[in-house]
Amino acid sequence: MRGTFMNGVAGVFIGTLASTAAGAMQDGPASNNTVQVQRQAGVAAYQPTYFTDFAPVTALDMVSRVPGFGLSNGDTSRRGLGDSFGNLLINGRRPSNKSLSLQTVLQRIPVDDVERIELIQEALPQYDMRGHSRLVNVVLREGAGVSGSWDARLQVSDSGRLGPRLIASYSRPVGPTEMTFGIDTGMSGNRAQRRESRHDANGVEFSRGSDNDQRQYEEFAPSWSMNWDIDDNSRLRMDARANIWTWTRVRHAAYDSVAGNTLTPQRLEHNETENHGSLYSGTLSYQRDLTDQISIETMLLATRDRWEDGPEAYENYDPVAGFTDSVIVSAGAEMEETAIRQTLSWDPNERHSLEIGGEHAINSRDTHLALSENDGVTITPINLPVAETRVEESRSEVFANHVWQINDRVSLESGLRYEFSEIAQTGDAQQTRSFTYPKPSVTLNYRSDDRNRFRFTGRRDVDQLEFGKFASSVDVTDNNSTLGNPDYVPQRTWTLEGEWERRFGDAGSFSLQIGYDWVEDLDGWVSIVTPTGVFDAPGNIGDGTNLRVTGNMTTPLDSLGLNNAVLDIFLEWYNTNVEDPLTGEDRHWSGYREWELSLDFRQTFPQSQMAWGWDYHWITDGEVFRSREYQLHDNTDGDLDIYVETTRFFGVTLRAQVDGVFNTGDDRQRVFYDGSRASGIINGTDYRNFTMGQTYQISARSTF
């Protein structure tokens, strides 16, 4: 009922905003701060004064307020280093890679070091778009010296636990080299609470329970970067990052049997664990201009990631007799990624840009999982297939990309990548397979005038290989085992996409994107029969399609009487379809939501140096189709966060905020079938509500 209500509210709200935006999108007199935004073909330059009302502290605050732009670290779901490059440039060059997030890079740049922010709205030969429709170029002022930033936070969780956090960085020039040191460290103590009821095949409730899951997460993440201008034609950049973390939890649960209106204590559950892990990542990038028109770049990447979980004993107790039994789980994994990429770029003239190159990567994952059962007398191992395994992929790719500025209004991007890969699995499952994937792409950009742009794209993508799907895993709390699937292959997608973007005023933008995806070997759930039983496993369920419509809008709200207020709107509709391999009927893709809505509102009061705002996220129900189980996930009323901040004291930005205002949690329904889901014979149904509660946070941040 609540989901239907929220659907209606969202519809009315979006309709109201659409009418407001329609009026705002009509060309009218230029705003009184036009001088703060300078436009030329394909590029809009935002002066620092444009962002004054937003009280920015770092370059991240400025970039987040560029109309119609969203910062992206790259598409990590697609294979290859080329897709991991984000949509940010610093002085015309990409600043980072997989070792550091773009948010981290921008947080380290004080506002005073920024000369201007450029929004590149179409493919131009002098900018490497890397498949992005828009880029932001942060131009730094010359002569920036020692600088730094800090951000101190204190969070209070629903359980009352305090979670301090410190994010700080320090940069200084050393001759032709700039060194940057950073740290991100802190802890949080969120508590998860669940309420659950279980029903038999006739819908009669027979069990009811609740649990309290107190968690604590601690991490220490130092980082280091070096930018060295070797000479006028050569540059070297190095990035290194580490992340050492510990995650602990203590969970208590109580279940009652239900008979009519009578509740009888049935059993108690208890488990506690300490998990820990570490990640080390480093990147080296060398660039050299061979001539005014030809340059080369060499990139090296190395990442090492490991984690250990448990041993964790899931203990069951009789309310009277005490301990009855337990399941003991111990798991862990080690992941490695090593890659090299070489490119050669040639700009023969101002209208053409050509890039050719290749890359090679070796990725691997070692996984172990041990299960045992303790009946109070003996501990007996539980055998699960594909519990100990290693997966290694060796992948090579050659590529060529071309940008052609046909005239002042039209540009064409084209590219072809060809991939060769071999996947070898050893341990409990042994298999070696080889693949080749051609990945062409073409994008046509057309600017009808300074306000309207159109983009048409066709491409083929190959999803990132998820090594975790090759190994088995368990969820004891949900009584669920997932088998590793040695036959899993990455899904491939052909896409046609069109986008219209319109700018209105200096602070408003609207874009509408329509895309259609044809997916080969769609990810889903398959059944695997073993001598010990029938298991669900991640796998490929055939071909599917997806029609999607995405709208983005940034609009000032002056027409509604809200001065210095801006609202960002994101609305997306997915119409996915696949033939269910069990039932033979058409259905949605597993795990995808039909509608998604995000709203971000901010209003500033410059004279009082105050601001407030909120952000809201809502999605429709999602379905999961396993072989012997169906799940329905409901986000209920969505997630609302509210904040207020001020810059009145000592140049420090102080903020107080509340996250999870509604605190209604997420609902889940699990329907269990007698054998295959295709039988339609229901064995029982579980209902669960999961919530992390509200969290409160105060923070202070500034630069020096």
Image (cartoon, grey):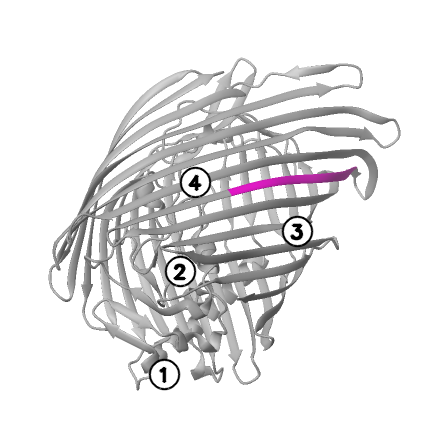
Residue 70 disc label: 2
Residue under pointer 4? 282
Q: Amino acid at mark 1?
A: Asn
**Residue lying at 65% horizontally and 47% vertically, measured from the top left:** 690
C-alpha separation, residue under disc 1 versus residue under disc 2: 23 Å
Image height check: is 93 above or below 47? above
Secondary structure of residue under mark 3: loop
Q: Circles 4 and 1: CB distance less than 8 Å?
A: no
**Nearer to us: label 2 or label 3:** 2
439 with respect to 323 (left or right): left
The question of residue 254 being in magenta is answered with: yes
Q: Amino acid at mark 4?
A: Gly
Q: Circles 2 and 3: CB distance less than 8 Å?
A: no
Q: Amino acid at mark 3?
A: Met
Q: Looking at this view, is 368 or 93 the one in front?
A: 93
Residue under pointer 3? 692
Residue 33 disc label: 1
Image height check: is 139 above or below 383? below
Farthest-out residue, right: 320
- Local crowd size for mark 4, using a 10 Å CA cut-off: few (<14), some (14–19), many (≥20): many
Q: Circles 4 and 2: CB distance less than 8 Å?
A: no
**Residue lying at 81% horizontally and 29% vertically, measured from the top left:** 317
Residue 54 pos. (x, y %): 48, 74
